[in-house]
């Protein structure tokens, strides 16, 4: 039996069933597709979101016992975007995001093992233990990070789009950011350039209403939807808690941008169920307990999809439990894998600072880094 | 060999590399239709078209970041800053992204980008347009910095920088663009990390980089009138640093003056002094002296500007101090 403690957030138990009656009109029990998605695809989306949820819960658990250090920002509550915006993309499309990146990375193809090992700071992590929670990378699956400075990834995402256009390729780049990032100059400069050069970039704001502890509305002169208008970039709003709406939107939008529609701006409304990072309480000075609880109860993307599938007789409780058991096992395995992975070899400290260590001259001046031999009493420059 | 200006040598290097590699492109303010704010990219728009020679909006943070992003896919952008003074707007992209992404991704994403443009003072441009920016760049592991002082070095070092797989800042001198010199014909590449002994003396070493090479040579000429022969070692590349060449000249003269255009506090010279005392302490017959810009923002008034800039006279005086000689007539 599933644990009751995670009931509201897990979406796995059937709650009180209160949502069942409301959506009967658009969810007749005899169809096997919803919104053009077959049963198998619907199950896949639900399974993905469940995987992300369990992964983040596992990370939370590991953080609490000191297996994960530093800053750690969980995506719990926002899984609808990882699944809905990234799963419709092609394998060679590019995704870049900020530091709330775990589930985004997994959605794009980084394995839960490689992601968890990176959170643990181990050699089998997707960044070899160099990046940590905020800096997951794997260009072979089109995941370009994992960036820690608010808004800093937006010009880079713009450059990814520029490179696609330069080469005449037909990929698209999806550049995620938090709502606070749109008040950075980097956002404005990027949108302007994307517009003048007609770049294949979809800028997606994960609008969870708060930049850390500051409500967007308190520090923003205009609404989110108005932010791209000055550059002539179309703005769209999607309900990020409705993964089917999100999935359909991005499936369509990716093809439109691929076909030459130019840059797009998407305000994806969502909500963060946890604190900003591990040190931030779920509720407190900037948002009330009641506000968070109402979102958790009514706006959980997993619960919303689960209920729709059950109402449409496309999902049984047994199937759900099997699905959940499977993703729990994946996350358990990821944590065990991470824990068993070696810590980085001290001899690799200076590896990958530079791609090319030139034949001449010294790159490291700390007196202990690797480099050509040098004499003198303080010249211990050999690592 | 052909005689050409420093400006044309830079142009020749970019064309040399753009001819051989389609992944190289030039982006910056005024680089295309205007031919470059300092005419370094003259004729390149006509030669390569607007796909590869691209006028950017005045958005240093934006276009520098765009170039970094393009580089992460394997393109080789030449990101021109009209001057490095303006690059402070883009430093997040340089320091946090270009410099660190290869390390943070454990070598999975390299950033083969060149940031280039003039650094340092010109004439009466006042505080915000007259500062040496090397220190800001060379401070960050992950970035390489080269400072060509002659037309030949400009061609060879810029070509090497474009071919390098790391972010390289090529810091030019605004007052050097019209300087003429012999430049090797055809493909010419100077490896990064190789200093150049621009003058061989033996009595005292003046070590320097960039535009200050010319001030050092002028000081050496003045000293020679009094029978003092100076080595002038041009680092050319600050990171990687040709430590062997530094130690060699120190061992020969036992007396060192470091000359740089920037401020002294944590400047390039501070690093060189630390290195020399760590690795060549026993070779020294005198403390190493530094000649830098006065530790003030650059003033506008001509008289004050002259005072603030490090000049040949300052270098001569410093050389005499490390030689324990009274200030002479030179």
Image (tube, coloured by chain):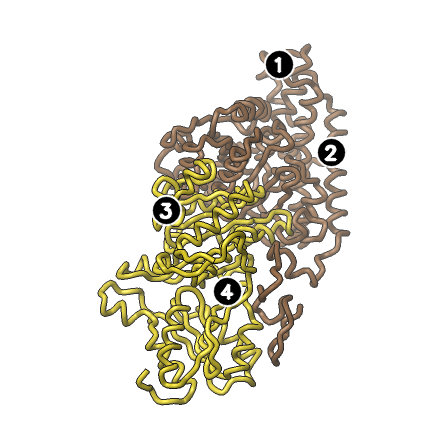
Chain colours: A brown, B yellow
Marked residue chain, label 3: B
Give the numbered dot on residue B238. Answer: 4
Label 3: few (<14), some or many (≥20) within 10 Å? some
Residue A95: x and y, percent? Answer: 58, 37
Residues at marks 2 and 4 touching, judged by CB atoms closer than 8 Å: no
Marked residue chain, label 2: A
Cα gap from disc 3 to disc 2, whole angstroms? 67 Å
Cα gap from disc 4 to disc 3, whole angstroms? 26 Å
Give the numbered dot on residue A2. Answer: 2
Residue B71: x and y, percent? Answer: 54, 45
Mark 4, secondary structure of its residue: strand
Label 2: few (<14), some or many (≥20) within 10 Å? few
Residue that carries the numbered disc 3 in the rendered image: B36
Cα gap from disc 4 to disc 1, whole angstroms? 68 Å
Q: Nearer the viewer, mark 2 or mark 4?
A: 4
User: Which mark sits nearer the N-terminus, 2 or 1?
Assistant: 2
């Amino acid at each position: 039996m599933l644990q009751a403690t995670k009931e509201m957030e897990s979406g796995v138990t059937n709650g009180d069933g209160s949502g069942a009656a409301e959506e009967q009109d658009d969810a007749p029990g005899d169809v096997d597709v919803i919104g053009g998605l077959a049963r198998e695809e619907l199950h896949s989306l639900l399974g993905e979101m469940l995987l992300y949820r369990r992964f983040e819960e596992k990370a939370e658990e590991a953080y609490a016992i000191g297996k994960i250090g530093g800053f750690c920002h969980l995506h719990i509550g926002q899984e609808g975007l990882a699944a809905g915006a990234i799963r419709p993309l092609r394998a060679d499309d590019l995704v870049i995001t900020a530091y709330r990146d775990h589930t985004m990375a997994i959605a794009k193809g980084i394995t839960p093992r490689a992601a968890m090992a990176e959170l643990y700071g181990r050699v089998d992590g997707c960044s070899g233990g160099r990046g940590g929670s905020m800096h997951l990378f794997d260009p072979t699956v089109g995941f370009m990070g994992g960036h820690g400075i608010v808004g800093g990834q937006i010009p880079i995402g713009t450059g990814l789009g520029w490179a696609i256009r330069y080469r005449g390729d037909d990929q698209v780049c999806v550049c995620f950011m938090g709502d606070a990032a749109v008040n950075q100059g980097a956002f404005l400069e990027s949108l302007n350039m994307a517009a003048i050069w007609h770049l294949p970039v979809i800028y997606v704001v994960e609008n969870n209403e708060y930049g850390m502890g500051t409500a967007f509305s308190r520090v923003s002169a205009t609404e989110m939807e108005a932010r791209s208008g000055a550059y002539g970039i179309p703005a769209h709003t999607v309900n990020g808690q409705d993964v089917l709406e999100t999935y359909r939107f991005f499936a369509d939008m990716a093809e439109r941008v691929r076909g030459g529609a130019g840059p797009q701006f998407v305000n994806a409304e969502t909500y963060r169920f946890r604190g900003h990072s591990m040190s931030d309480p779920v509720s407190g000075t900037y948002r009330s307990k009641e506000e968070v609880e109402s979102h958790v109860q009514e706006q959980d993307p997993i619960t919303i999809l689960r209920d729709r599938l059950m109402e449409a007789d496309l999902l049984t409780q047994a199937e759900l439990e099997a699905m959940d058991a499977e993703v729990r096992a994946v996350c358990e395995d990821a944590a065990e894998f991470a824990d068993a992975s070696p810590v980085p070899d001290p001899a690799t400290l200076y590896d990958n600072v530079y791609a090319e260590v030139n034949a001449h001259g010294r790159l490291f001046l700390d007196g202990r880094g690797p480099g050509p031999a040098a004499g003198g009493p303080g010249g211990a420059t050999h690592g | 060999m052909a005689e050409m200006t420093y400006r044309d040598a830079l142009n020749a290097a970019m064309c040399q590399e753009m001819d051989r590699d389609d992944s190289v492109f030039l982006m910056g303010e005024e680089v295309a239709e205007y031919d470059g704010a300092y005419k370094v990219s003259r004729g390149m728009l006509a030669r390569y078209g607007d796909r590869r020679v691209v006028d950017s909006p005045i958005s240093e943070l934006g276009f520098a970041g765009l170039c970094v992003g393009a580089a992460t896919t394997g393109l080789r952008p030449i990101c021109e800053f009209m001057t490095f003074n303006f690059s402070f707007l883009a430093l997040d992209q340089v320091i946090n992204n270009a410099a660190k992404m290869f390390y943070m991704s454990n070598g999975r994403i390299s950033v083969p980008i060149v940031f280039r443009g003039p650094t340092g003072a010109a004439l009466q441009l006042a505080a915000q347009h007259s500062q040496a920016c090397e220190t800001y760049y060379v401070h960050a592991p992950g970035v390489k910095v080269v400072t060509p002082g002659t037309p030949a070095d400009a061609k060879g070092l810029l070509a090497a920088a474009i071919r390098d797989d790391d972010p390289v800042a090529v810091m030019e001198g605004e007052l050097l663009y019209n300087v003429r010199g012999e430049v090797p014909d055809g493909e010419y590449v100077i490896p990064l990390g190789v200093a150049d002994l621009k003058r061989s003396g033996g009595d005292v070493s003046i070590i320097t980089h960039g535009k200050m090479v010319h001030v050092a040579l002028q000081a050496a000429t003045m000293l020679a009138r009094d029978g003092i022969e100076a080595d002038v070692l041009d680092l050319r590349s600050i990171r990687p640093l040709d430590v062997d060449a530094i130690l060699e000249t120190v061992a020969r003269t036992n007396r060192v003056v470091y000359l740089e255009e920037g401020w002294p506090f944590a400047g390039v010279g501070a690093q060189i002094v630390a290195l020399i005392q760590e690795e060549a302490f026993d070779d020294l017959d005198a403390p190493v002296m530094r000649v830098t810009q006065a530790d003030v923002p650059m003033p506008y008034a001509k008289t004050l500007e002259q005072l603030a800039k490090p000049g040949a006279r300052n270098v001569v005086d410093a050389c005499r101090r490390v030689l324990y000689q009274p200030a002479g007539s030179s």
